[in-house]
């Protein structure tokens, strides 16, 4: 037991330092002065060096060799520590801190390039990031598939080939549904008018608490891109407002609350340990998506939201619940992934999945990326990209080196489809509860059946434990066909 206890005590301090590093990232996106970027990138590189040294400390290897887990949770802790140790010992410390330094700077270059439609300035920086991540991936893969090695950081135990098979099935169904919806005579309404920021922020805070967000262990700030960060007793979210589009604020908030609820819902016994967090990015995304879409955009909950919006903003021109439900779920082809509806969203992801695999494989150069992006977008969406910020400059992910991350969004949607099917079976009067703004039945079910386990099980095991069957795209497609087939009469 001594080796196990020593290892866990050391690991707990590493986890605590990891939380500190994460909070530096939160600070950078919310309240950091603009002029601090250069210093911050050095601070983050220094933290990364400290963390890397701890994660590769030779004592960890010795403890792992000698440790005996006292129970199933202990075995899961050893599995996660071993995975991290093996991963980190394969990457030279100089490369790890170089990646931290370059991606921190690249993010700033990307933000300015996007604002000024300036691909040329960003291109060499992205080339640098891709080069470093390919180098890292090669070290991790040790002769195996480089992209799969990168994927392991976000969705452990999953390969690009498995994802491709699932995406293929989903894609066929989505392309068919999209064609039927766009061919429909029905054009759903959109909201008009402006909605004051104070009202949006007040109602989004109310919605966060309605969905179970614990403000005693969290806070909501504004950021350009909404995100959640932290774990255990300090899980923060951000949101944003847009005068003409209050749904952007409300559904961004509900989405991030889904992520935060997962972290807040993990068994407190796992606090500051490797299994005291979500099982993977895909499982994480399943929580945010089911909160946002299956629950938040349901007909039943939209009726409740309409009344809360009337109470907040007065008469805003929509009073009929069915019209409001249509406005929330209106299908519209567009350039921007984060603004995509449920029918289009996963098609955006599949495109990024294919492009980033080509970049990592070396089949596509960064210089050729805009052309490849625009050609694929026109083929899939029927529109010519008119400017870089509507094309390959729109997402932050690649600038910060997140290759292998995009597919977890669609995996999350697939998982959410499975979980919603199980949730509906478990709570027969779910719609009646949602119509009253009572989310606790659904959020308690998710916490009890999934969230509390943290990373105790592997990602597919986590979903299967909650749903009773292994995840497939079938339930998501059935849900989308029923919902949008109904809305558009197709
Ligand atoms: Zn998310």
Image (cartoon, rainbow, N blue to C red):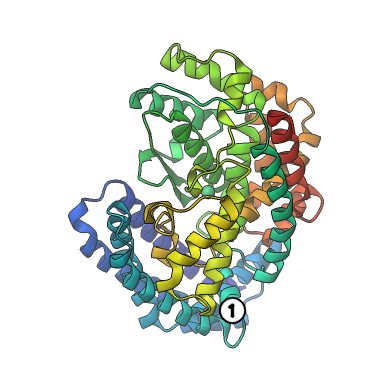
305 shown above or below 395 = above
List the single residue furthest toward the bottom: 143
Residue name at image x 51 percent, y 50 percent:
383
Crowding at dot 1, Cα within 10 Å, few <14 / some 14-19 / many 20+, comes out as: some
> What residue is drawn where x is 38% and y is 74%?
127
Image coords of residue 422 (percent x, y): 77, 41
Q: Where is mark 1, residue-wise?
A: 64
Residue 267 appearing in the image: no
For the residue pair 465 and 161, the one nearer the viewer reads as 161
Classify 131 as above or below 318.
below
State the image coordinates of residue 390 (x, y, percent, origin top left). 42, 51
Name the spot of residue 468 as percent of width and height, x first: 81, 50
Mark 1 residue CB less than 8 A from any atom of ligand 1? no
Quadrant holding the C terminus:
top right
Question: What residue appears at the point 47 percent right and 13 percent down from the top-left corner?
Answer: 311
Q: Which corner quadrant of the image does residue 222 belong to?
A: top left
Please state the horizontal and vertical placement of residue 478, each as a whole percent of the image: 77, 42
Quarter occupied by residue 107: bottom left
Does residue 103 appear anywhere in the picture?
A: yes
Position of residue 215 relative to residue 11, above or below, is above
Residues 309 and 371: in front is: 371
Drawn side of residue 277 relative to residue 218, left or right: right
**SS assignment at label 1:** helix
**From the viewer's perspective, is residue 401 above or below residue 418?**
below
The residue positioned farthest toward the left in the image shown: 35
Q: Nearer the viewer, residue 84 or 356?
A: 356
Could you tell me how many numbered marks the image carries? Answer: 1
Question: Image quadrant for the N terminus?
Answer: bottom right
Left of 144 or right of it: where is 236?
Answer: left
Q: Residue at left 68%, top 64%? A: 163
């Amino acid at each position: 037991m001594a080796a196990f206890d020593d290892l866990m005590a050391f690991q707990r301090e590493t986890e605590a330092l990891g939380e500190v590093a994460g909070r530096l990232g939160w600070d950078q996106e919310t309240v950091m002065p603009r002029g601090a970027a250069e210093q911050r990138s050095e601070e983050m590189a220094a933290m990364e060096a400290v963390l890397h040294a701890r994660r590769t400390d030779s004592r960890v290897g010795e403890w792992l060799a000698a440790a005996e887990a006292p129970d199933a949770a202990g075995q899961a802790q050893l599995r996660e520590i071993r995975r991290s140790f093996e991963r980190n010992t394969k990457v030279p410390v100089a490369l790890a801190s170089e990646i931290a330094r370059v991606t921190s700077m690249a993010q700033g270059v990307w933000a300015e390039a996007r604002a000024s439609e300036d691909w040329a300035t960003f291109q060499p920086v992205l080339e640098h990031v891709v080069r470093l991540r390919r180098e890292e991936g090669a070290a991790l893969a040790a002769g195996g598939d480089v992209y799969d090695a990168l994927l392991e950081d976000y969705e452990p135990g999953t390969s690009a080939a498995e994802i491709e098979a699932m995406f293929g099935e989903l894609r066929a169904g989505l392309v068919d549904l999209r064609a039927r919806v766009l061919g429909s005579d029905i054009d759903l309404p959109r909201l008009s008018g402006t909605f004051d920021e104070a009202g949006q922020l007040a109602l989004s805070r109310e919605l966060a608490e309605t969905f179970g967000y614990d403000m005693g262990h969290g806070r909501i700030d504004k950021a350009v891109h909404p995100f959640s960060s932290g774990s255990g007793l300090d899980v923060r979210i951000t949101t944003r407002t847009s005068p003409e589009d209050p749904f952007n604020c409300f559904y961004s908030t509900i989405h991030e609350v889904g992520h935060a609820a997962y972290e807040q819902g993990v068994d407190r016994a796992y606090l500051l340990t490797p299994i005291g967090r979500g099982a993977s990015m895909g499982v994480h995304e399943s929580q945010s998506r089911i909160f946002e879409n299956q629950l938040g955009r349901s007909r039943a909950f939209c009726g409740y939201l309409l009344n809360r919006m009337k109470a907040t903003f007065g008469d805003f021109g929509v009073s009929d619940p069915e019209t409001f439900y249509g406005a929330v779920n209106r299908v519209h082809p567009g350039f921007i992934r984060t603004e995509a509806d449920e029918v289009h969203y996963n098609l955006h992801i599949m495109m990024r999945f294919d492009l980033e695999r080509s970049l990592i494989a070396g089949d596509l150069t960064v210089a050729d990326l805009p052309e490849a992006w625009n050609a694929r977008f026109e083929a899939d969406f029927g529109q010519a990209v008119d400017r870089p910020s509507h094309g390959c400059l729109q997402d932050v992910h690649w600038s910060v080196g997140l290759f292998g991350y995009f597919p977890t969004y669609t995996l999350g949607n697939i998982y959410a489809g499975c979980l919603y099917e199980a949730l509906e079976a478990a709570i027969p009067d779910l719609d009646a509860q949602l119509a009253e703004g009572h989310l606790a039945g659904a959020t308690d079910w998710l916490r009890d059946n999934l969230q509390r386990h943290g990373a105790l099980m592997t990602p597919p095991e986590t979903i299967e434990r909650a749903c009773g069957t292994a995840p497939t795209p079938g339930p998501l497609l059935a849900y989308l066909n029923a919902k949008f087939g109904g809305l558009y009469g197709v």
